[in-house]
Image (spheres, rainbow, N blue to C red):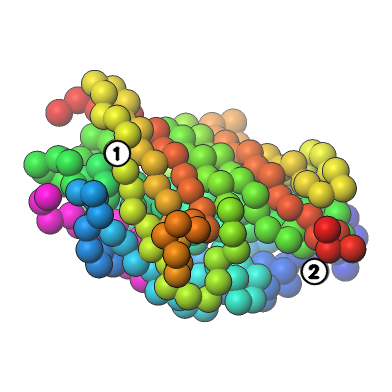
Amino acid sequence: MNKVALLPYADFLGISIVGDQGGAPLLSMPFAEGLTGHPERLHGGAIAGLLEIAAIAAIDATLDDAAEARERFKPITVTIDFMRPGRPAETFACGEVIRIGARIANVAVEAWQEDPTKPIAAARMNLSIGKS
Amino acid sequence: MDADASSRLSDFLRRSSGHTVALGLRFVASGDDWLEIALDYDRRLIADLSSGILASGPIVSAFDSGFGGVVLMCHGRLPEATLDLRIDYLRPARPAHTVSVRCECYRLTRRIGFVRGSAHDGDPAKPIAMAAGTMMLQTGDGR
């Protein structure tokens, strides 16, 4: 896996790469006040941001030139299901590239806190692939 | 909408959520079943340094906050939680432009608020994103 660089927005959310899972970067988002919706609860948009960044990182990891990937891969649609409240704790996310076709890439992502078998949210993202 | 409700919504954006405050989301306008909020351009929120284009995450956050606000307006209480969100990205937001996000609640059942919205970067006739979602409502009996 090449070295994946995260979006600048990832810095804003406090996200970093902490490992690898199934060939995709494992991301961590430590809890911070700036991530909350209700008090003591993660904002849905912050969780969505983590999921999208993990999805993009998973795609970047499959390519030789991640900078080129940013030019070519554009999100078309994202669907996010929220399953459990996000508590004031560290949140992890890792994407899984389901398919990269000629024109469309499809990625699935999950986010969890203490227990990877109890995700707090899941997303599916379709991206269009521009010309190389 | 009366001035009191308007200022409650402004307060909601300013104080109820650390993330909303961190993004600098601000109240713009509202009607019976809709709410408009603004996300000002900020280079910390971008996807890519060379293009300066906004990441999609902040737009999702704006929708989620806006949906919470419009449920507060229509149901009288903040939602318990977001159940799901779907965002379609029609075009990238132009760098250095403020993104306006309009949210409406078009149906309330006993447990669920059905919401939808659109975002633009200066021209409402040329949206950058469309969104739909469902919010779980607070119910008095907790069930």
Give the left or right position of residue A58, taking residue B83 as reference: left
Magenta stretch: includes residue A112: no
- The percent position of residue B17, horizontal first and vertical second, equals 62, 71
Give the left or right position of residue B67, taking residue A115 as reference: right
CA–CA distance between discs 2 and 1?
45 Å
A84 w.r.t. A70: above or below: below
- The percent position of residue B80, horizontal first and vertical second, equals 73, 61
Residue A97's mark?
1
Which residue corresponds to the image point at 64% horizontal and 76% vertical from the top-left?
A: A39
Type of residue at label 1? Val
**Chain letter of the residue carrying label 2:** B
Which residue corresponds to the image point at 49% horizontal and 56% vertical from the top-left?
A: A119
Residue furthest to the top in view is A102
- As rendered, which of B55 and B86 lies closer to the eye? B86
Image quarter of the C terminus of chain A: top left
**Chain letter of the residue carrying label 1:** A
- The percent position of residue A70, horizontal first and vertical second, equals 24, 43
Could you say whether the residue bearing mark 2 is in a helix, strand or loop?
helix
- Where are the magenta residues, as a range? A1-14
Residue B98 visible from this viewpoint: no
Q: Are marks 2 and 1 in contact (CB under 8 Å)?
A: no
Type of residue at label 2? Ser
Quadrant of the image occupied by residue A85: bottom right
Residue A41 visible from this viewpoint: yes
Numbered-mark total: 2
Query: Residue tagged by mark 2?
Result: B7
Could you say whether the residue bearing mark 1 is in a helix, strand or loop?
strand
Magenta stretch: includes residue A10: yes
Residue furthest to the front in view is A117
Mark 2 vs mark 1: in front: 1
A77 w.r.t. B69: above or below: above
